[in-house]
Image (spheres, helix red, strand yellow):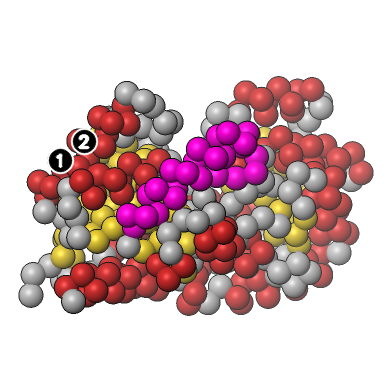
Amino acid sequence: MRRWRIVHVITRLELGGAQENTLYCVAHHDRSRYEVGLVAGRGGILDPEARAIADAEVDLVGWLRHPLHPLWDPVALLRLAAALRRRAVDVVHTHSSKAGIVGRVAARLARVPAVVHTAHGWSFHDEQPPPLRLLYRTLERAAGAITDRVVVVAESDRAKGIAAGIARPERYRLVRSGIDAGAYRRGSVPREETRRSLGFAPEDFVVGTLACLKQQKAPLDFVEAARIARGRDPRFRFFIAGDGPLREAVERRIRETSMRDSIRLLGWRRDVVDLLHAMDAFVLTSRFEGLPRAVLQAMAAGVPVVATAVDGTPDVVRDGETGLLVPPGRPEAAADRLLSVAADPDAARRRAERATAVLDEEFDLRAMVRRVEAIYAEVLDSKRR
């Protein structure tokens, strides 16, 4: 029985949950059943990891670019279709918005039998101007009509997609973003050593986040929450591990609020486990999400979580039970919750322990890959019939 040919398509391998989970699938698909390939725009921080997957055909290309572009997008569409036709691909699995739309149209042009798309959160959201939101929703509807299965990482994304008229309801499948929870239980260096390297004292109450500095993650809300919390409790110190287009605005806001001695901007970091274990609390101020991998990582590390109640986050952060939730766009509420964590560390620890316990098989990386492969088999079997 021949092996099926699968190609994953993603716009760029930035340091993020969608990209890391895509790479994990590429590296861990069952090689007795599948030949595996990846097409991604080059220039991402995870490019070396992609190239290191020796038994997958990895193409990091210059013509697949992130922003919508009237000249480059048709080029990407035609070149991708030609590449898929040349490989005689059986399944194309696209990820996120730009690659999701270009990749699915290219797959149909190449007459690929099965097309699967994972929406790691939708491309349209309430933070966009209405004309742009309408454009993205229209594009998602058109792409959904030629998609065999739409994978979502949260129930809220399924409901939002169906309400927007994207694909038929029976084509949706829920597959949680996975992590290796055991890998986060302890750091590679002592907690105090990491804190000292970041410039924090043992008595400081350290709050961190892992986030790209872009609109979705609302880093300016993080800075404002930090300013409020620090003004009420001088023990508070903060750091952001991540980078992105809003870095300059974040730096400017830190200067304006006189928080330069209290907030560290670390840029992209790969020592995520050590950073988590250096925290006394983790906070995520996102305005919209899919299912944030950083929250799962913090929970696995046993760090008390404060997060905005958006999209898939409440699926895992149950307010008062496994963490604390606040409304999006309300940094004063995030500051209040952080102050409550600092004021009652025993209650915070109990919530963190319950959070660690809920990361069962549903959020396991290996189970995630097997569920994705079951979707491929389901679609291919239906095509044969």
Q: According to the image, label 1 marks what residue?
A: 82
Q: Is residue 347 magenta?
A: no
Q: Secondary structure at mark 1?
A: helix
Say if mark 2 contacts mark 1, CB within 8 Å.
Answer: yes
Whether residue 12 is visible here, answered yes or no, is yes
Q: According to the image, label 2 marks what residue?
A: 78
C-alpha gap between disc 2 and disc 1: 6 Å
Question: Type of residue at label 2?
Answer: Leu
Camera-side residue: 78 or 35?
78
Rendering coords of residue 336 (x, y %): 86, 52
Is 331 located above or below residue 300 in the figure? above
Where, by quadrant of the figure, is residue 374 drawn?
bottom left
Rendering coords of residue 152 (x, y %): 47, 62
Residue at the far left: name it.
1
Rendering coords of residue 105 (x, y %): 29, 45
Q: Is residue 142 magenta?
A: yes
Q: Name the quadrant of the N terminus.
A: bottom left
Q: Which residue is painted at 43% across and 71% down in the image?
A: 170
Rendering coords of residue 88 (x, y %): 11, 54
Q: Which residue is painted at 79% across and 50% down in the image?
A: 334
Q: Which segment did they paint magenta?
A: 124-147
Q: Which residue is painted at 82% across and 55% down in the image?
A: 337
Question: Left or right: where does residue 116 sit relative to residue 181?
Answer: left
Question: Left or right: where does residue 337 sit relative to residue 223?
Answer: right
